[in-house]
Amino acid sequence: MEKEIKKLQDQLAQQQKLASLGLLCAGIAHEIQNPLNFVINFNKMSSRLANDLEDITLAISDRIGEDELEELNDIVADLKENVNKIQEHGQRAVSIIQGILLLSRGKEGEKLPTDIPALLHEYVWLSYHAMRALDKSFNANIHETYPDNMPKVMIVPQDLSRSILNLANNAFYAINERSKAEGKDFRPMFDIMLEYSDNLITIVISDNGCGMSQEIQDKLFHELVTTKPIGKGTGLGMRITHDLITRGLNGKITFHSAVDNGTTFQIDIPCEQC
Ligand SMILES: Nc1ncnc2c1ncn2[C@@H]1O[C@H](COP(=O)(O)OP(=O)(O)OP(=O)(O)O)[C@@H](O)[C@H]1O
Ligand SMILES: [Mg+2]
């Protein structure tokens, strides 16, 4: 009886922590949305200015030297490319913020026809490049297996993309840790496989990184745990991913892991073809 009461008290304390964490996340998301709007709006203005500059360059092209014209054209092209990048990543930040707001309000996202292989490919490589940007020495052999001619399916895309990003970030981090510990002889591997049958998609993500201790595994989906140094991890990633997969996508997520050997996550999500 006493044990049972203690367990319930612990659960309650945990739930209260999560509720205030939800509020905190919503508050932060909301505060970030404002400066983000500025970034996006000023970027739109910059886009128009780049177009004006292009027009002016064209208008004066017969009055300036060939070298100057070439330089001006290069600058305009670079400006336009930068503006497009800011637009693309700004929108991505907006949808992440929206996702956090929706999650902390407990609302469901909208199902959209989604090209799952394209989504998986995009987010795995996004995570990989983000890791490479932080650590130039990082490398991994990425192996992707997707079914041929997979039809689009109805799914909440941002729930899946955030989950894949969280899982890939963890996997690449774990691979990097092991790589640093074992040195040159280690062959870092990241594997993602997708299967689709009977309105069920199965995604298996494996890494041969540092793996997880039993203690971390026991807490992974239920408590906030991190083995990363301050500033590198919050311990929120897997908790959010578990929520997104089970509540957002009505699916399930399982894993197995062994220290110094690697980790495999499996996600099963029911979905309808469009
Ligand atoms: N693929 C993996 N290989 C090894 N350890 C992992 C893996 N995935 C998760 N972990 C362990 O689980 C812990 C919790 O992961 P989680 O994603 O919840 O938080 P985090 O990565 O530490 O921080 P963040 O909030 O930035 O995601 C990690 O700190 C790490 O110790
Ligand atoms: Mg993480």
Image (cartoon, rainbow, N blue to C red):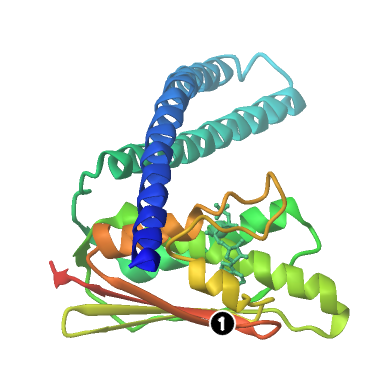
Percent across and percent down for residue 231 are 68, 44
Helix, strand or loop at label 1? It is strand
Image quarter (top left, top right, bottom left or bottom right) of the N terminus = bottom left
Image quarter (top left, top right, bottom left or bottom right) of the C terminus = bottom left
Which quadrant holds residue 183? Answer: bottom right
Residue, x 34% and y 60% (percent of image)? 5
Residue, x 50% and y 23% (percent of image)? 39
Task: Please tell me which residue lies in front, 81 or 261.
Answer: 261
Write down the residue under mark 1.
257
Residue, x 66% and y 33% (percent of image)? 74
Say left or right for 224 vs 130: left
Residue 16, above or below 159? above
Residue 122, above or below 69? below
Say left or right for 80 vs 213: left
Percent across and percent down for residue 3 are 40, 67
Which quadrant holds residue 106? Answer: top left
Whether residue 162 is visible, yes or no, is no
The CB of the residue at mark 1 lies under 8 Å from ligand 1 = yes
Amino acid type assigned to the residue bearing label 1 in the image: Ser
Task: Please tell me which residue lies in front, 79 or 178.
Answer: 178
Q: Residues within 10 Å of mark 1 (few under 14, many from 20)?
A: many
